[in-house]
Amino acid sequence: MSFLIVTFVAFIIGGLIFYRYIFVAKNAEVNVLERPVFFNVDIYKKVLEELQNREQTIQELNSKQHSNPFQMPAIPAPVPNETIPS
């Protein structure tokens, strides 16, 4: 019995969601922008300049030789003990 109730409630919720996003969305009015969209060339140039600077920085970093932090440092050879003349 509880299975039928849960199924019925699920169908009602699914129907409401379907109605909301299919039928109501088709009949809703579309909001039109009243002011025209414009393109600011100065801001565009600044953004392009910043992207070029970043690209140049990345190229400089890629060209550098970095040391391997996981490589064991070279251990110097031990110095032989000198005998002290008496």
Image: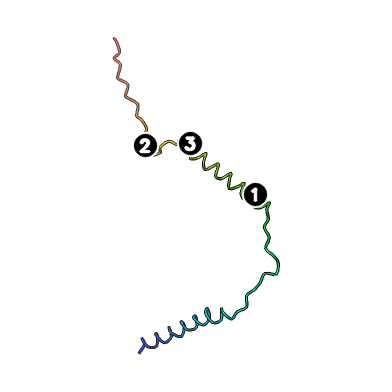
Q: Earlier in the sequence, mark 3 or mark 1?
A: 1
Q: Nearer the viewer, mark 2 or mark 3?
A: 3
Q: Amino acid at mark 3?
A: Lys
Element assignment for label 1: helix
What residue is rendered at 48% in x and 37% in y?
A: 63
Would you say 13 lies left or right of 81 here?
right
Residue at coordinates 41% horizontally, 87% vertically from top-left?
8
Quarter of the image that includes the N terminus:
bottom left
Q: Amino acid at mark 2?
A: Gln
Mark 2 vs mark 1: give the one in front: 1
* Image-quadrant location for residue 56: top right
**Mark 2 and mark 1: span between their CA atoms?**
42 Å
Q: Position of residue 60 (x, y in %)?
A: 52, 39
Residue annotated with mark 1 = 46
Q: Is residue 73 left or right of residue 22?
A: left
User: In the image, is residue 20 above or below residue 35?
Assistant: below
Q: Which residue is mark 3?
A: 64
Residue placed under numbered mark 2 in the picture: 71
Asked if residue 6 is positioned above or below residue 74 in the image, the reply reads below
Classify 10 Å Cα crowding around label 2: few (below 14), some (14-19), many (20 and above).
few
Residue 75 percent location from the top left of the image: 34, 29
Quarter containing the C terminus: top left
Choose the circle earlier in sequence order: 2 or 1.
Answer: 1
The structure residue drawn at horizontal position 51% and vertical position 82%, both measured from the top left corner, is: 19
Front residue of 75 and 8: 8
Disc 3 secondary structure class: loop
